Structure formats: C-alpha cells, structure tokens
Image (tube, rainbow, N blue to C red):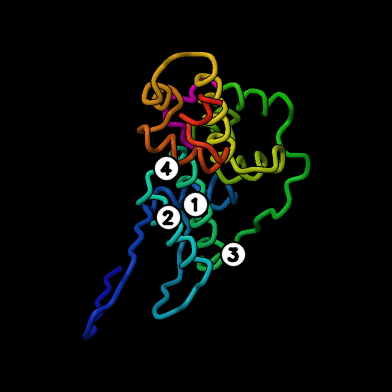
Amino acid sequence: MPFFARWEGDDHSLQIRVTAQFIQTVAREALAMNPDRLELLPEFRARDPQLEAMGMMLLTELNQENPGGALYIDSLANILAIHLLRHYSVTQPQVATTYPGGLSERQLLQVLDYINEHLNQEIKLADLAQLLNMSQFHFSHLFKQSLGIAPYQYLLQQRIERAKQLLNQTDQSIMEIAFLCGFNSHSHLSKQFRQLTGLTPKAYRAK
C-alpha cells in the first residue's frame, strides 16, 4: 500500500521486505490458512519488541556472513512471517506451541545423512524440510525437539567436527579444509573453530 512520511534531522531505519508469495507459503504450510484470503492489518508508529529483535538478528547475520547462515536466516524469516500472521492478520491462526515426540528416528537419520553428505555446500532450511515433506517452521521445531539444538547450530557443529578430522588425519592446508567443510575462508573457519573449541585450527593440529 502507498506510504509517505516526512521528518527533520537524522534518523535510522531498517526496512524488511517480505514477498507476498513467501507469506502465503508459510500461511498455507505452517498454519493451514487459506493463502488467497490473507490480509495484514496496517500499523504505523507501533512498537513491537519481538519484531525489532528479529530485524536486528537478521541484519547482524547478513552482515557477518557466517557459515550455516542460510539455515539461520531461513529460520528467522519463517519465524518473522509466523509472527506477522499471528499478530497482524485479520484472521487469527492457531499455532501449535508444543511438538511432542519430535522427528521419528527414520526422519532424523534421513536429515542427518543429508547434512553429512553436503557439509561442503550451502544447505537451506527449505532443502531439509522438503526431505520430509513438511513446512520449514514445523521442521525447525521438530528438529530442535529431537536434538535440543536448532538445525543451523547442528550444521555448524558438524562442520567443525569434520574440520577436526581433517586436521588430525590429513596434511591438507587449513584453507583447503575450510572449503571442504563449507566455510568461505580460512578466517571464517578459524573464527568459528575457536569459538567452539577454544583453539585455532593451527593450534588444534599442533596438539
């Protein structure tokens, strides 16, 4: 809808654009809402701490270019869409707050095998959810229920574990290992490796 605003002096703003198609997909897959009947209520000069927090988390992640970032950004985008539909939709959806049991053993093994086979590639939340034919929102919650951590956290852990193996068992350079484990550079690997292990890759190899 058209919008116009005027102010004097310096100001800071963060603009997030969400496509109608994405909102409709989340509404249909995660909330069983009719995507053709969606209507969001217009709001102006309203404070929403949760929405602000999501926006800043998205901005921070996009600026840092962390490994596993695609999974994290996808998760945040889905949560943001659910928040908009729950709080600003004309028709209020019913969202399940508990997910008893998590993923089945077969489903979990299927997802973990996929992650393990594609550690050196970009893995998106949509890829994992599609494996089990479920929405990204529900997949994220069921995965966390099963393992106690979010998909992007598990992906990062597995990339670090693969890096440990290669550091111990091969003479490949740290740069080569970084690419084999899905990191963009030597520095990206070193930063995440040190955060999780307390050591740099070089120091870990020298142990």
Please give the residue where the numbered disc 4 appears in the rendered image. Answer: 66
Residue 125 in sight:
no
How much space separates mark 4 and mark 3, taking CA atoms?
Answer: 35 Å
> Residue 7: horizontal and vertical position, in percent?
24, 84
Which corner quadrant of the image does residue 97 belong to?
bottom right
Upstream in the sequence, badge 2 or badge 1? 2
How much space separates mark 3 and mark 1, taking CA atoms?
Answer: 21 Å
Q: What amino acid does circle 2 point to?
A: Leu
Choose between 167 and 27: the one closer to the eye.
167
Please give the residue where the numbered disc 2 appears in the rendered image. Answer: 58
Upstream in the sequence, badge 2 or badge 3? 2
Q: Residue at x 35, y 33 (%)?
A: 185
For the C terminus, give its image quadrant.
top right
Numbered tag placed on residue 10 in the rendering: none
Q: Residue pushed farthest bottom?
A: 8
Q: Residue at x 34, y 65 (%)?
A: 14
Q: Residue at x 56, y 41 (%)?
A: 198
Contact check, label 2 and label 1, Cβ < 8 Å:
yes
How much space separates mark 2 and mark 3, taking CA atoms?
Answer: 25 Å
